[in-house]
Image (tube, helix red, strand yellow):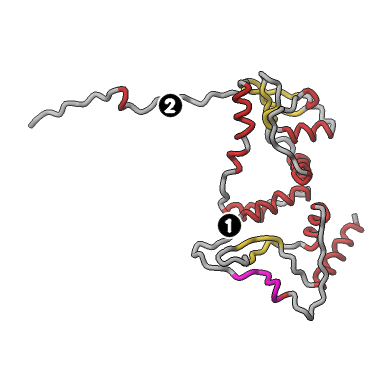
Amino acid sequence: MKKKIPVKKSASMSAPKVHPWKNQIVRSAEVSPEKLLASPFNWRVHQKAQTEAMVGILDELGWVQKIIVNEKTGHIVDGHLRVQEAMRREEKTVPVDYISVSKSDEKKIIVTLNSVGAMAKAKPDILESLLNEVHFEQRSVDPVLAELAASIDLDDAGGEKEKPEVAFTEELLEEHNFVVLYFDNSVDWLNLLSILDLPTVKALHARDGFMSAGVGRVVKGNEAIARIQAAKEVRRKK
């Protein structure tokens, strides 16, 4: 029986050497927001609803993530909106993590930091469960929750169509009396959602094979009146 001769692996056959990721955070500090510089490379424009939602989250939960600042340039890398609102509220300090990177790397971070997270897809069952359990006192957070609810893929595993929970063509007939309300601002709309306790419902899309989700907008008149009167009573007692 011939003896096997072990084959010595060459450098080219070896697994590539993996270098540990470098920790670019050099220090942390509590800093006056007035001393922080907005980055000239910040490409995001924050809408009113987003600003109100961020303030609502901070009011209810406080700081759970630090501002990121590049020590070499002094620029804010992440957290422009939070710094802006901290200055508006005259907060004395904000929590900051300082990193030390080149200007070119700073640009890479600004482009990708939150963008990569936005690419993630939701696990519908877990997200739906969370949305059912989570309740914010700050109503300004509602648009964030509503957007998350609308993003859930509601197709069932078998690919079969579900009938709409609210069928507009069956509810609104010629003999029915109804009024249509429209809103040009999110505050009044969210106030109505709260008063009428409008649910998230499934509805079949006009195009075959599509399904969408949204807030149920068909409410019986007597139920709406009862809910509005109940809301008035609660506010009167406050």
Q: Locate the N terminus by quadrant.
A: top left
Q: Which residues are magenta?
A: 163-170
Write down the quadrant of residue 132 in the picture.
bottom right
Q: What type is the residue that disc 2 sits on? A: Val
Badge 1 marks a residue whose secondary structure is loop
Say above or below: 160 vs 85: below
Q: Indicate which disc, 1 or 2, sits on the residue closer to the N terminus.
A: 2
Say above or below: 44 vs 196: above
**In magenta stretch: residue 238:** no
Write down the quadrant of residue 195 in the picture.
bottom right
Q: Which residue is rendered at x = 75% and y = 29% of the image?
A: 94
Badge 2 marks a residue whose secondary structure is loop
Q: Which residue is rendered at x = 68% and y = 31% of the image?
A: 78
Where in the figure is residue 69, as x and y percent of width and height?
68, 25
Residue closest to the eye, 119 or 140 = 119
Where in the figure is residue 84, as x and y percent of width and height?
78, 33
- Quote the CA–CA distance across marks 1 and 2: 38 Å
**In magenta stretch: residue 164:** yes
Q: What type is the residue that disc 1 sits on? A: Asp
Which residue is under mark 2?
Answer: 18
Say above or below: 100 vs 184: above
Where in the figure is residue 72, as x and y percent of width and height?
66, 18
Write down the quadrant of residue 229 in the picture.
bottom right
Quick one: label 2, few (<14), some, or many (20+) residues within 10 Å? few
Which residue is under mark 1?
Answer: 153
Residue most toward the left? 1
